[in-house]
Each structure stands twice: as structure tokens, then as C-alpha cells.
Image (cartoon, helix red, strand yellow):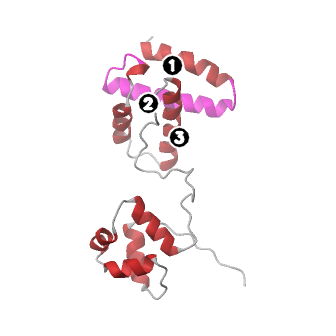
Amino acid sequence: MRTWAEELQAHTHDYVRRGGKQNRKKQVSLIIAFLEFTDSTEKLTSLDRLGKRHVINFWKSHRDLSEKVSYDYWLGICKLWEWINKPDKPPKPNNFINPGSVSNGVFTELSSAIKSARESYSYTIQQLANLTGLEATLIESIESGETKILFSDILCLLKTLKISTLYQVADQ
């Protein structure tokens, strides 16, 4: 048996015995899949040698994972980080938004959704204007809540910022 597997077994034995057993077994299997990938790419001799670089390489090789699966892997890797007493959190994949965020990514006003998405990409208004071909003053007016805007301009911003919409019809 490999060294990292023996080290992992000490942590997983008690972990799987308590709490939601199916979920914990699934999480352990994801941790093992991550460790097996890391061991196959760079011979892993000990869990203490794991670092952020290993997690980043894992995310780069698994870009095709869905947001949910990526999040499940990330939670498992967080648990592994906790077991081996690593500081901070492991790097997150680039393909998901943290489901625990304050607004949970749901906005009732288009202006705040566009501003929040622009800020999450760290775009200035001018950079977004360059990306979309829209005037910077138009983007400022949209973010301030002005309502007399062409729908095609709004669609251009939504597409560029990868904002999805939910339609809800109110009963009258």
C-alpha cells in the first residue's frame, strides 16, 4: 500500500463512520480520485507534500467537469486540507460561483446584476465598453438603473458577462 493511502486511511476511517454515510463515502471517493490523479502525474509520497500547485493542475486537467461536480470535488479537497492542517482553503476551480455567496447570484434588478458581474470579472466600465462595443456612458447609465435602454444593448451585456436570466410572470 502506498504511503499517502495509509495516511489517508487514518483520517477517513472515523470520518465515514459518523454523519451522513452516503455523502461522506462519496466525498472520500472524490478525495481518493484527486489523490490518484496527483499520484499519477507526480509521484505523491505523503499527504504533507500536497500543495496548491497540485490542486491547480487537477483543475486544469478537469476543466470539463460540471459546476456541481467541481464544487463536490472542491468540498472534498477542503476536507483533505483540513485533515492535513493546511492553512487557508485550496484553490477553487474557475468554472463555478461559490454557492454560499451572500446574494447567491440572484438579482431582482438588471442594473445590479450587470454591475456585480462586471466587478466579479474585475472589468472597469471602459474595459467592458471595449469588449462590447457599447459606449462607456451607456454602461454607466444602465448600471445606475436608467430604463430607456435598447434591449439589444442589454442582451449584448448579458452575453458578454455570461449572465443568465430567469423570467417570472406576476399574477395580476
Neighbour tally class for label 3: few under 14, some 14-19, many 20 plus, Cα within 10 Å: some
- Residue 32: x %, y % from top left: 48, 26
> Whole-Å distance between the Cαs marked 2 and 3?
12 Å
Residue type, label 2: Phe
Q: Quadrant of the C terminus?
A: bottom right
Q: Is residue 170 left or right of residue 63?
A: right
Residue type, label 3: Asp
Residue placed under numbered mark 1 in the picture? 8
Question: What element does badge 3 sit on?
Answer: helix
Query: Which residue corresponds to the image point at 48% horizontal and 74% vertical from the top-left?
Result: 111
Residue placed under numbered mark 3 in the picture? 72
Looking at the image, is 126 positioned above or below residue 26? below
**Extent of the magenta region:** 18-46
Q: Nearer the viewer, mark 2 or mark 1?
A: 1
Q: Earlier in the sequence, mark 2 or mark 1?
A: 1
Residue placed under numbered mark 2 in the picture? 34
Question: What element does badge 1 sit on?
Answer: helix
The residue most toward the top is 1
Query: Which residue corresponds to the image point at 37% horizontal and 27% vertical from the top-left?
Result: 38
> Whole-Å distance between the Cαs marked 2 and 1?
12 Å
In front here: 27 or 121?
A: 121
Q: Earlier in the sequence, mark 2 or mark 3?
A: 2
Q: Is residue 118 visible?
A: yes
Q: Is residue 33 magenta?
A: yes
Residues at marks 2 and 3 touching, judged by CB atoms closer than 8 Å: no
Residue type, label 1: Leu
Query: Which residue corresponds to the image point at 29% horizontal and 72% vertical from the top-left?
Result: 126
Q: Is residue 162 visible?
A: no
